[in-house]
Image (cartoon, rainbow, N blue to C red):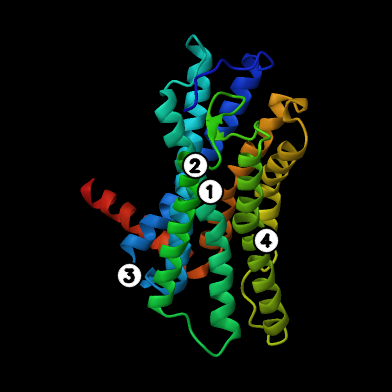
Amino acid sequence: MAESRSLPTEFGELEVLAVGTVLLVEALVGLGLNSLTIFSFCKNPELRTLSCLLVLSLALADSGISLNALITAMSSLLCYQLPPQHWPYGSDGCQAHGFQGFATALASICGSAAIAWGRYYDYCTRNRLGWNMAVTLVLFMWLSSAFWASLPLLGWGHYDYEPLGTCTLDYSRRDRNFTSFLFTMVFFNFILPLFITHMSYQLMEQKLRKTGHLKVNTTLPARTLLVCWGPYAFLYLYAAIMDVTSISPTLQMMPALIAKMVPTINAVNYALDCEMINRGLWQCLSLQRSKQDRTQ
């Protein structure tokens, strides 16, 4: 079990305030946009399609990331302001926070790959993605994410405190347990989804660009995975090979700040950029406004 530790002396009030504020803004924006997507799916029957089901699953995962970021922001500020500057929820809270953040992060990564594969399957093959396959894909994605996130709780890998005092995978251990878990996890949950996302959109672009029916962004999803989750993967791989204490605590927090932008980027790319979902959002907002006008 993780033992509470003090914040690094390198973190002053300015650093804690800056990191906490950035995380808070990322959390609120991501949570707001993805909540709108979920709300519109529940309220608008037109959005209850196979493609929107995958987007809904991604929005749920990204909402979990934003919620985790919100707890991280509030806890980091709280544990610095209140002595003895420790994680305020204890060891069990650290394990739960680490599990929730890791599971939703993996579900978001796999969700992007599932959308890419689903679009390729629909647009570039003679078959159509049925409800049974789509539901099975979503269930597999969430069960797989929960499985990988539970492994550190069972002893393969470990959840511990980040430099700012919040909880994530412990990358400070360079033993065989950490190294074997790290390389296996990175391959199945980062490299493989990134490959599926990139290849699915590349094959779509090659086939549909000639017909002029290409209506989705074929480069942003893979770039988002690489740019936003790549720094985390690089940090973990560096920690497995080199002494991670040579990196300042401030730099060690940068991958977390970058990764927490994923919910906002995904909401803009998959929901707001989709004509059907965008129309559903405005219909729901217009409905709410009309109800408020009637009550007034």
Q: Nearer the viewer, mark 3 or mark 4?
A: 4
| Residue placed under numbered mark 2 in the picture | 101
Q: Position of residue 244 (x, y in %)?
A: 73, 30
Q: Mark 4 or mark 3, which is nearer the start of the sequence?
A: 3
Q: Position of residue 232 (x, y in %)?
A: 67, 43
The kind of residue on which mark 2 rests is Gly
The kind of residue on which mark 3 rests is Pro
Q: Nearer the viewer, mark 4 or mark 1?
A: 1
Q: Mark 4 or mark 2, which is nearer the start of the sequence?
A: 2
Query: Marks 2/1: CA distance?
Result: 6 Å
Q: Bin the neighbour count of mark 4 within 10 Å (Cα to Cα): few under 14, some 14-19, many 20 and up.
A: many
Residue at x 34% of width, y 66% of height: 44
Q: Position of residue 181 (x, y in %)?
A: 60, 46
In-image side of 53 versus 109 (left or right): left
Q: Bin the neighbour count of mark 1 within 10 Å (Cα to Cα): few under 14, some 14-19, many 20 and up.
A: many
Query: Marks 4/1: CA distance?
Result: 15 Å
From what the image shows, is residue 252 above or below residue 203? Answer: above
On-image quarter of the C terminus: top left
Q: Which mark is residue 105?
A: 1
Q: Bin the neighbour count of mark 2 within 10 Å (Cα to Cα): few under 14, some 14-19, many 20 and up.
A: many
| Residue placed under numbered mark 3 in the picture | 45
The kind of residue on which mark 4 rests is Ala
Q: Bin the neighbour count of mark 3 within 10 Å (Cα to Cα): few under 14, some 14-19, many 20 and up.
A: few
| Residue placed under numbered mark 4 in the picture | 222
From what the image shows, is residue 131 above or below residue 98? Answer: below
From what the image shows, is residue 28 above or below residue 124? Answer: above
Asked which quadrant contains residue 287, the reply is bottom left
Q: Secondary structure at mark 4?
A: helix
Query: Marks 3/4: CA distance?
Result: 30 Å
